Image (tube, rainbow, N blue to C red):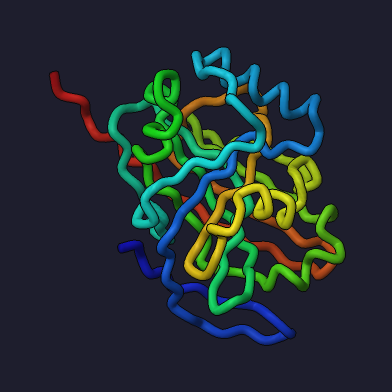
Amino acid sequence: MGTKLTFTLHAGGESRTETLAIRHAVIAGWTGRDKVALEKHIVELEELGVARPASTPIYYRVAAARFTTAGEIESTGPESSGEVEFMILQADGRRWLGVGSDHTDRKVETYGITVSKQMCDKPVAATLWALDEVLPHWDSLLIRSYAVIDGARVLYQQGSVAAMLPPEEIIAGYGPGFSDGTAMFCGTLAAIGGIRPAARFEFEIEDPVLGRTIRHGYDVTVLPIAG
């Protein structure tokens, strides 16, 4: 089971295209390094009716087939939204850094977080960087997202990955299950102006030290709810 996605891999000053198998998909939640920012995000979700986590970080499993590099997803009902997260993917014994959106059904999230994670596809950019090449300047990396709401493109999230625990610490918290074929989203930032749905969601991770950025975006088609 699982899925196969084609990525452009960047390592050692070279790039290549390779299709990688993802067999295990994990969403690491409440990974904030800054406890004040972490509390802000928990409160933000509490306002939507989402209960506090039993522990932090916490690790949710979703079907690997939910991960996609497509430019469009379908969502049941109008109450879902995206959030940018850096992603760690392990293949052939090497760890790679990417970026994705933990698109989530916010209505379902109020009564079942794990179920809400499973409800929506998880768009990811089709580019990966070798993780070991960015770890020496990790805290300089930036993530941000934009949302198209009522026809206007607005900055939705922005900040440093330093807001989250370092990737090796997040992975260590998950335990020995992180192996080849595992992809993990590793945390997000508070939404500027609050969590809300959008017709289109765009996200990126920027490495200002090496002067490069990974970007992706996707449109959201809302499916009707009958009955």
Task: State which quarter of the image contains the N terminus.
Answer: bottom left
Residue in the picture at 56% in, 25% down: 195
Q: Position of residue 219 (x, y in %)?
A: 40, 46
Residue in the picture at 50% in, 43% down: 102
Q: Position of residue 100 (x, y in %)?
A: 54, 52
Left or right of residue 219, residue 38 in this image: right
Where is 15 relative to 205, above or below? below
Q: Position of residue 151 (x, y in %)?
A: 47, 34
Residue in the picture at 59% in, 37% down: 58
Quarter of the view holding residue 45: top right
Left or right of residue 107, residue 131 in this image: right
Taking depth in this image into account, of 79 and 200 the one nearest to the observer is 79
Task: State which quarter of the image contains the C terminus.
Answer: top left
Where is 111 relative to 19, above or below? above
Counting labels gives 0
Q: Is residue 108 visible?
A: yes
Where is 52 relative to 119, above or below? above
Q: Residue furthest left?
A: 227
Left or right of residue 226, residue 186 in this image: right
Q: Position of residue 51 (x, y in %)?
A: 53, 17
Quarter of the view holding residue 78: top left
Q: Is residue 156 visible?
A: no
Residue in the picture at 74% in, 43% down: 164
